[in-house]
Amino acid sequence: MLEELKKEVYEANMELPRRGLITYTWGNVSGIDRESGYFVIKPSGVDYDALSPDDMVVMDLDGNKIEGRYKPSSDTATHIELYKKYEEIGGIVHTHSPEAVAWAQAGRDIPLYGTTHADYFFGPIPCARNLTPEEIDEAYEKNTGLVIIETFETRGIKPMYTPAVLCANHGPFTWGKDAAEAVHNAVVLEEVAKMARNTELINPKVKPAPDCIKEKHFYRKHGANAYYGQN
Amino acid sequence: MLEELKKEVYEANMELPRRGLITYTWGNVSGIDRESGYFVIKPSGVDYDALSPDDMVVMDLDGNKIEGRYKPSSDTATHIELYKKYEEIGGIVHTHSPEAVAWAQAGRDIPLYGTTHADYFFGPIPCARNLTPEEIDEAYEKNTGLVIIETFETRGIKPMYTPAVLCANHGPFTWGKDAAEAVHNAVVLEEVAKMARNTELINPKVKPAPDCIKEKHFYRKHGANAYYGQN
Amino acid sequence: MLEELKKEVYEANMELPRRGLITYTWGNVSGIDRESGYFVIKPSGVDYDALSPDDMVVMDLDGNKIEGRYKPSSDTATHIELYKKYEEIGGIVHTHSPEAVAWAQAGRDIPLYGTTHADYFFGPIPCARNLTPEEIDEAYEKNTGLVIIETFETRGIKPMYTPAVLCANHGPFTWGKDAAEAVHNAVVLEEVAKMARNTELINPKVKPAPDCIKEKHFYRKHGANAYYGQN
Amino acid sequence: MLEELKKEVYEANMELPRRGLITYTWGNVSGIDRESGYFVIKPSGVDYDALSPDDMVVMDLDGNKIEGRYKPSSDTATHIELYKKYEEIGGIVHTHSPEAVAWAQAGRDIPLYGTTHADYFFGPIPCARNLTPEEIDEAYEKNTGLVIIETFETRGIKPMYTPAVLCANHGPFTWGKDAAEAVHNAVVLEEVAKMARNTELINPKVKPAPDCIKEKHFYRKHGANAYYGQN
């Protein structure tokens, strides 16, 4: 069942330790098959060394396990909310990558300071608010997803233009058209977070990059007039 | 004698350089067999490359060497005090891992800034006070253990809820139910120390994470209602 | 055609990920054959793992593709302006190496703080101004080259004495007598940028190194009286 | 001639890139045979990949080449002054390791903040003053050695108790009883420099560690009452 997607999601999960984003089991990747409405996600707390494509868990968007011998990631309910709200999302990643976590713990958006950021994210990486004690008690992981959505909706951010968020005092989620692209964005986010930290250390009064640079670089890689790469 | 434990402790010691926590011989891991009351510890100042399970030294809790051709770690007396006071501790690690050492040298607790920390430590990582000149002269390593205990007792910290400490101007000790878990906690401490440093650089006015987040994440992984992982 | 140069440029490109300067496809190296007036450059957005010498694109200085099945790097027009203006330049590199990018995003020259810098660069690494919206709209990559030239000309910096520049809110370009030397300078720039950041963290009131040190070290390695190395 | 010493010095040189202290050819190690008065040093500007024990250059303390097909390190005259002044020194290292260079460029001693430092260096790592323009012109490398000696003599520092120095705006030299120990001390210095930088970032008002800690840890490893290790 969904063998191809399981392989893709497995490969995307294994890319996380290869890229240095993961300590122990601190991360998860999922990918969705929009036709069936099922998605595939990493099992909870299983060592990366021990994973195989067959260990991936198949879920539906109501949170029912469709197939798999393991329990799905404890963050599954967050993935579900994002998939339900945003049809364009095909893959989701959560990590505790240290540079992005530092911004999340600091409770700050990552400002857009340059073209490395603008090549992938059309504006600051937003930092979503903390959940209230009631939201945590009621349904922590589901409400984490809803607070991410609240952040994008109230601030008018397009999720496919800025495919990343920081959850305050927690860490980053990223997404993309599929699991591989979501991981790619997680790698870029970590690099951008590190560059932004060092930028502020070098110049504490630095301002974000001008909008014309943001627009030039984003549209050089994205949309109808893109001319980066071979397409 | 205690062949299985020697292998466990040997493997736990070898994990330190693999995880990048160790320069030269700057660290030691021990594990205890509570039935016999004997514990197994790394020899002092021997290269990791040259170690084998048979080189591990067997000691009793009075500091007598029971078996082994080498002298035990110079920090053995610190391990003894912790094993004697806290029955739940099954393994202990000491390193000079650089991020944790920086907090120890700074003389500060590591504040709980997020879920990465709360997944493992139920509150700040305490920084134990310096020893007095008299305590150093009298019995440096033993008194290091006693000052760690003093820190946990006077501050009312449960050692299995916060299995790590910083010794001022020195470095970290961590522990766990066995040697492998103690090493796991040493790895997490180093990651948490790095994240906390960068968090404060990004936001010098940052406050610790709310208690509701601390409690949610700690109890998601620990205790009767834990639901992280496959158990 | 230009088989030897293609191999050189290919090798110089492959050195970038080996030296840790590159994430994904974020960089490009070119080298020029001054006799024919043709230069060879990496194709746009192709994975380093998939590259071969034959994938290198041959261009002329008017921006015409002479040979190659791929589109050239999107930064090709920047390379062209530098080759046209400065006859001594034989190879050019662009990266998003994180330490140099942090200075570019901070909008600051890298001060000459010591001999590591002075061994390669005869003064601060200049940070070129941002392009205006009109310059971006008209011809972004070409005007990037022209703003680099403007920086060197108005400030009286000799490009072969200081073979590196930071483009504000973007990142570094370096060059040299050939592609390999340009990459060498990119590696040194990254190291110098990191050292300079840490120097200012350790001493926020630090001043640049005295001119006598700059001159001693630069001329120890460069020019008629050089005595470093085996020549 | 001096085949054993050449091998030792070759191995000590090769340890520098393995330990991550070296970019390109930015470093050199020497070792001395006190009986003959000859010392062996790395050739100038030769790639580490291309070195063999036979490439090491044999010199006398008057600066005459005794054997070797290469020119010796451009820093040879600095090594000579240290060997002539301090009979106990058996090996010397110079690097541009980035954390130590940052302190040298900042023009600051590295304060003794903890036991990692005190295990090897009995007090702050001194930062030697800049050379005057006249000293540079007259004999740069020789005078670098003389200024290091001036630093130790005027401040009353014992070179075998604190076997390291920072040359202002330049970088570190370390030494030891032989070439291998000198490299060991270069590795420790880099680690200590990084820890000290981060210590100050975490606590800008931090004070050096108490003398009783310095003395306890130094004498635990050094001198007649040492009890660290297997001797």
Image (cartoon, coloured by chain):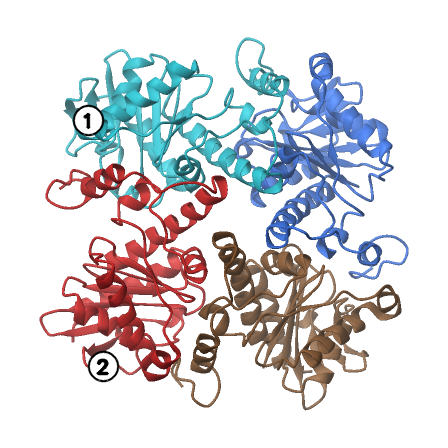
Chain colours: A blue, B cyan, C brown, D red
Please state the horizontal and vertical placement of residue A196, each as a whole percent of the image: 65, 49
- Residue assigned mark 1: B139
Residue toward you, D170 or B89: D170
Instruction: For the N terminus of chain B, give its image quadrant.
Output: top left
Residue, x 63% and y 25% (percent of image)? A43
Residue, x 45% and y 70% (percent of image)? C115
Please report, as a chain letter, where disc 2 is located: D
Q: CA distance from mark 2 to mark 1?
A: 51 Å
B224 vs D210, left or right, is right
Q: Which amino acid, mark 2?
A: Gly
Residue toward you, C165 or D47: C165
Instruction: Say if C131 sits above or below B186 in the image.
Output: below
A58 vs A226, left or right, is left
Check whether the beta carbons of the residues at disc 2 and disc 1 lie within 8 A of each other.
no
**How many numbered badges does the structure rendering display?**
2
Q: Residue furthest right?
A: A224
Instruction: Say if D45 sits above or below A74 in the image.
Output: below
Q: Quadrant of residue C212?
A: bottom left
Please state the horizontal and vertical placement of residue A156, each as a whole percent of the image: 87, 37
Instruction: Say if C16 sits above or below B50 in the image.
Output: below
Please state the horizontal and vertical placement of residue C21, each as a whole percent of the image: 58, 60
Crowd rating for badge 2 (residues with CA inside 10 Å; few <14, some 14–19, many 20+): some
Instruction: For the C terminus of chain B, give its image quadrant.
Output: top right
Q: Residue B72: tell me if it is visible.
A: yes
- Residue assigned mark 2: D63
Q: Which amino acid, mark 1?
A: Ala
Residue, x 72% and y 84% (percent of image)? C85
Crowd rating for badge 1 (residues with CA inside 10 Å; few <14, some 14–19, many 20+): few
Q: Quadrant of residue A163?
A: top right
Instruction: Say if B204 sits above or below D100 in the image.
Output: above
Residue, x 49% and y 40% (percent of image)? D202
